[in-house]
Amino acid sequence: MFVAALGGGFFGAAIGGNYVFALTGFSILAAIGAAASGATDFSANLFNYVSFGPFLGPNIAFGGAVAAAAYAAKRGYLDGGKDIVKPLAGLGKMDVLAVGALFGGLGYLIKTGVAEIPWFGGHTDAVATTVIISAILSRMCFGDHKLFNTEKGKLLSTAEGQHWLDYHEKPTQLLTMGLLGGLFAAGVSVYLGVTVPGIGMMANTLPFAFSAITILILSLGGTTPVTHHVTNIAGLGALVFYPVVAGIDSLAASNGVINWGAALGAMLIGTVFGIVAAFLGELFARLFQIRGNTHIDPPAFAIFTGNTLVWVVFALVG
């Protein structure tokens, strides 16, 4: 798996971070389709080895691309270390692709370690957590070595040229995106999670996959919103709290029959988490991304904190 992850990191760097992340979305669609058709073993292999494993796992392929871009900028091969769109194979620099491979392997090791942390490892998104750890290491190795750069302005402020996505950074924009994107993701997730036994608690990866694929539009110049942190966390919140609202032990206990009242309650709960995730994404963009000279992914930060928040609230509710 580690050796395969070296290849995954190379592949991500070669074709570009955003493009390889979109491929992750397509592979999730295949895994969900396999689960829905009853091929659960095949689906598990797609999820674990391809979508979130050494081939296309964001902790490996996307993380490798982020590190390779930071390194390329440091060496003067690339104009900016935050360029996660450009396929780096076109630079013709094998050392850049080697850095991607090394960080792909590192991403596999970090994720394996995170998953073994008592309680936290099973109650967070270990892939997203690893994306952040890897990106911080990339900045420390190849960037300006600063997590919080206040030389270009106040920490949470924006200014000309200092935006993540200026068309959804205002509170009303974030609220709308979190509310409606969250409703969409929570509804899809809870319905599929309850009615399709082979999907179950992985149902939130379907709206996440849709969001990941739309990054292709962004990479090609379209002003599409970045929503995978919203759809992931809203869907997870709905799945986790549906049994609570329905008064059952688990999704499986529903026997494939949906309780519409409980589904609506779970959707509303999931939507609240989706709104929180939308604001977390912008918060982390202003803290780490907009004034840094390498990429530290705001949605990944929102996913790992939002995922943990869902489980903390669940534990408090009991």
Image (tube, rainbow, N blue to C red):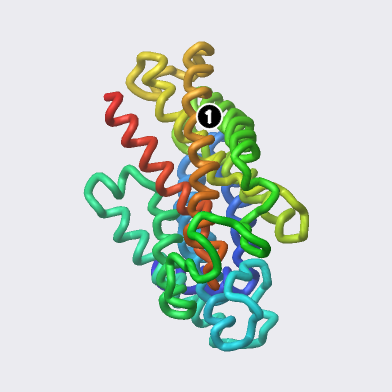
**Mark 1 neighbour density, 10 Å: few (under 14) some (14–19) many (20 or more):** many
Judge whether residue 203 can be spotted in this image: no
- Where's residue 18, x and y in %? 63, 61
Quarter-of-image position of residue 116: bottom left
- Residue placed most toward the observer, 83 or 153: 153
Determine whether 55 is above or below 80 in the image: above
Q: Residue at x 54, y 31 (%)?
A: 189
Mark 1 secondary-structure assignment: helix
From the viewer's perspective, is 93 left or right of 129? Answer: right
- Where's residue 150, x and y in %? 48, 66
Q: Residue furthest left?
A: 118
Q: Which residue is mark 1?
A: 271
Amino acid tagged 1:
Thr
- Residue placed most toward the observer, 90 or 197: 90
How many discs appear? 1
- Residue placed most toward the observer, 69 or 10: 69
Judge whether residue 44 can be spotted in this image: yes
Quarter-of-image position of residue 208: top right
From the viewer's perspective, is 28 left or right of 312? Answer: right
Determine whether 3 is above or below 260 in the image: below
Quadrant the C terminus occupies: top left
Determine whether 10 is above or below 54 in the image: below
Q: Residue at x 43, y 72 (%)?
A: 146
Q: Residue at x 62, y 74 (%)?
A: 14
Q: Residue at x 54, y 49 (%)?
A: 282
Quadrant the N terminus occupies: bottom left
- Where's residue 96, x and y in %? 56, 83
